[in-house]
């Protein structure tokens, strides 16, 4: 099946059930908001009603977005997305009132969540809601902030998204977008990579004033609102949203900084393999080795299921069922968005995966990654909304693990040195982005917040900060990318600052999980499911501790880096022979 099956969900955005749920969401949200003012309102019943509304909201928005992703030119699907977003406004408004309701019933929350209480399982999430309530302005001010956000920070975000996706520049006999130019970074032709990079720099430089205005607007508003809500800094809020404690966060960041020599060795080996004395920024994604193996869609399915089943029969069986039931939309076609994603539908207990399979190993790896997310969904979907909603830091756990075990299988079955080098480089290239580049983004954003408190930051300064962050992380490169801040949409989000470090967490946590498997294969699956089940109802450190991992200890993160270091040594050996 080469298109996903949507009939077991709503079928389409104009179906009677989809339209009925749009109305039901708004009606239930408004009714509950009115009832929250009643002091006799039963707390447990109120929580159940709130979670029912969250389930409807998540399902409607996920479905509309999925439909549009396969046909971005469809007016019908665009209307469905707009309808889902409009209905969600009632839930956004309800959220503030729900936080205040929980805060008013603080003593009752303590009684209900104590050991043996009716809501014992909700102890962490309700405690989190109480903390969030302490960082919430009055409903009037929150509503005002929300309204202004649509014409302020959200408008700036849309500006960045629109300009970065549509901006074009002359090249040869035609024009190229920034996305098209970035694609040449993967070319084996260095001269082509260089010319495309120079065109890209010229494109972003032309539009940099607009991006700078947007970035200054978003960061300025974030500093103001986070301050009014009682956060010491945007970073404090971000770490809290990620369900990390300061000790774990600093252990992660410190390990990333200390791991830089490992990645610089990889970059030096890659430079030598490419016949260069020193890499330029446009060489980072240059292919090394030869990947001659091609896969049909059927072969890709079989390969992923076989590799994953060896580590977790339950996960492998789930992936096989997902393919069989048509939960995957695998092939690129006109009007379909690029990239890949997984999304879940709580009302139906199902997930869907979008991919753009190209027959390469990278396409196979994408299936493993996204179906890892879907397996995670399958573990938490039976739980109520508040107990299954996990933070970004833990969102990549199952996907990274699934991707890594698939890679190990591919390496084991590789038939040539060139293919092995290609696979090793793909892994290290990704790890370098997730650890080194993301650290550079963290350093950049941290400095931008510091400078923004003093006033507007001009384009030249933003470029200088970006280059310094790249020098401090990548080390010596022949050429850096001063305009990287223009194209990364994550910088332009006011809802979650420092968006990128959770990816580094996910990468290293996933590798740490693989070490758990190696230490005790026989009991791995049980521990794995236990961990995934806890991701929505505990902080990251408690989830890790449930299977005996101490992520507050730097040694955990260092051991994960040692897995990467092993790949670097293998890569160096294979490149030299």
Image: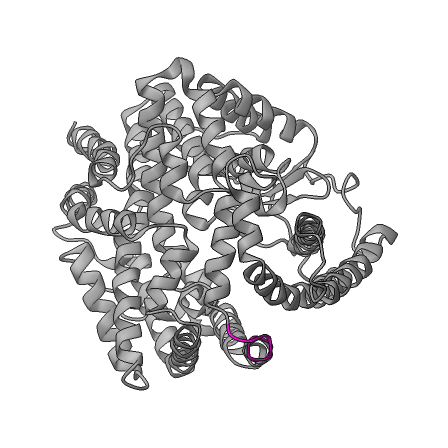
Image coordinates of residue 231 in percent, x first then y, are 37, 69
Majority secondary structure of magenta residues: helix
- On screen, residue 152 versus residue 451, left or right, reads right
Q: Can residue 426 be seen at all in this image of the molecule?
A: no
Residue 98 image-quadrant placement: bottom right
Figure coloring: one colour
What residue occupies the far right of the structure in this picture?
Answer: 16
Image coordinates of residue 305 in percent, x first then y, are 53, 23
Pick the front one: 518 or 129: 129
- On screen, residue 366 versus residue 350, left or right, reads left
Quick check: 37 above or below 526? below
Write the start and end of the magenta stretch as one range: 137-143
Residue ID at (33%, 64%) = 235
Residue ID at (45%, 27%) = 528
Residue ID at (69%, 50%) = 59
Quick check: 545 above or below 38? above
- On screen, residue 228 versus residue 420, left or right, reads right
Image coordinates of residue 91 in percent, x first then y, are 67, 63
Pick the front one: 567 or 113: 113
Quick check: 454 above or below 422? below
Pick the front one: 250 or 178: 250
Residue 317 image-quadrant placement: top right
Q: Can residue 370 be seen at all in this image of the molecule?
A: yes
Give yes or no for residue 254 being in the magenta stretch: no
């Amino acid at each position: 099946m080469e298109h996903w099956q949507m009939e077991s969900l709503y079928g389409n955005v104009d179906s009677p059930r989809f339209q009925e749920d749009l109305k039901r969401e708004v009606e239930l949200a408004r009714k509950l908001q009115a009832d929250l003012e009643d002091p006799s309102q039963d707390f447990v019943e109120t929580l159940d009603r709130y979670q029912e509304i969250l389930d409807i909201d998540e399902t409607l928005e996920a479905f509309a977005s999925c439909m549009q992703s396969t046909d971005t030119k469809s007016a019908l699907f665009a209307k469905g997305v707009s309808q889902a977003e409009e209905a969600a406004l009632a839930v956004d408004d309800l959220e503030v009132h729900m936080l205040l309701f929980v805060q008013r019933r603080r003593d009752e929350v303590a009684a209900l969540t104590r050991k043996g209480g009716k809501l014992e399982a909700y102890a962490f999430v309700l405690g989190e809601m109480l903390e969030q309530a302490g960082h919430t302005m009055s409903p009037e001010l929150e509503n005002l902030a929300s309204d202004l956000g649509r014409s302020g920070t959200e408008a700036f975000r849309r500006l960045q998204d629109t300009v970065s996706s549509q901006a074009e520049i002359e090249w040869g006999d035609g024009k190229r977008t920034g996305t098209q130019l970035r694609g040449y970074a993967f070319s084996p032709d260095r001269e082509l990579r260089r010319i495309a990079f120079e065109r890209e720099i010229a494109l972003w430089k032309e539009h940099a004033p607009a991006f700078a205005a947007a970035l200054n607007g978003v960061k300025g508003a974030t500093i103001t609102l986070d301050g009014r809500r009682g956060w010491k800094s945007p970073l404090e809020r971000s770490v809290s949203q990620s369900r990390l404690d300061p000790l774990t966060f600093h252990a992660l960041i410190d390990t990333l900084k200390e791991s830089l020599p490992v990645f610089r060795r990889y970059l030096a080996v890659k430079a030598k393999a490419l016949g260069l004395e020193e890499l330029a920024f446009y060489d980072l994604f240059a292919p090394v080795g030869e990947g001659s193996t091609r896969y049909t869609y059927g072969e890709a399915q079989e390969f992923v299921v076989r590799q994953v089943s060896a580590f977790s029969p339950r996960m492998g069986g789930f992936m096989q069922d997902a393919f069989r039931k048509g939960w995957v939309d695998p092939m690129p076609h006109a009007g379909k968005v690029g990239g890949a994603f997984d999304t879940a539908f709580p009302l139906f207990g199902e997930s869907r995966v979008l991919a753009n399979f190209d027959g390469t190993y990278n396409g196979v790896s994408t299936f493993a990654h996204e179906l890892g997310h879907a397996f995670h969904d399958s573990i938490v979907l039976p739980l109520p909304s508040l107990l299954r909603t996990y933070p970004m830091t833990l969102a990549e756990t199952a996907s990274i693990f699934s991707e890594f075990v698939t890679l190990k299988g591919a390496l084991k079955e590789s038939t040539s040195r060139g293919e092995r080098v290609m696979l090793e480089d793909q892994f290290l290239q990704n790890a370098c982005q997730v650890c080194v580049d993301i650290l550079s983004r963290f350093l950049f954003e941290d400095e931008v917040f510091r400078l923004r408190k003093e006033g507007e930051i001009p384009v030249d300064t933003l470029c200088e900060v970006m280059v310094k962050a790249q020098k401090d992380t990548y080390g010596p490169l022949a050429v850096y990318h001063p305009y990287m801040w223009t194209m990364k949409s994550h910088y332009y989000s006011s809802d979650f600052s420092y968006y990128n470090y959770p990816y580094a967490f996910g990468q290293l946590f996933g590798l740490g999980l693989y070490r758990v498997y190696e230490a005790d294969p026989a009991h791995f699956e049980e521990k794995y499911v236990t961990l995934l089940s806890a991701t929505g109802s505990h902080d990251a450190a408690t989830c890790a501790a449930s299977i005996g991992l101490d992520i507050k200890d730097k040694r955990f993160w260092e051991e994960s880096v040692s897995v990467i270091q092993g790949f670097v040594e293998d890569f160096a050996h294979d490149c030299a022979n």
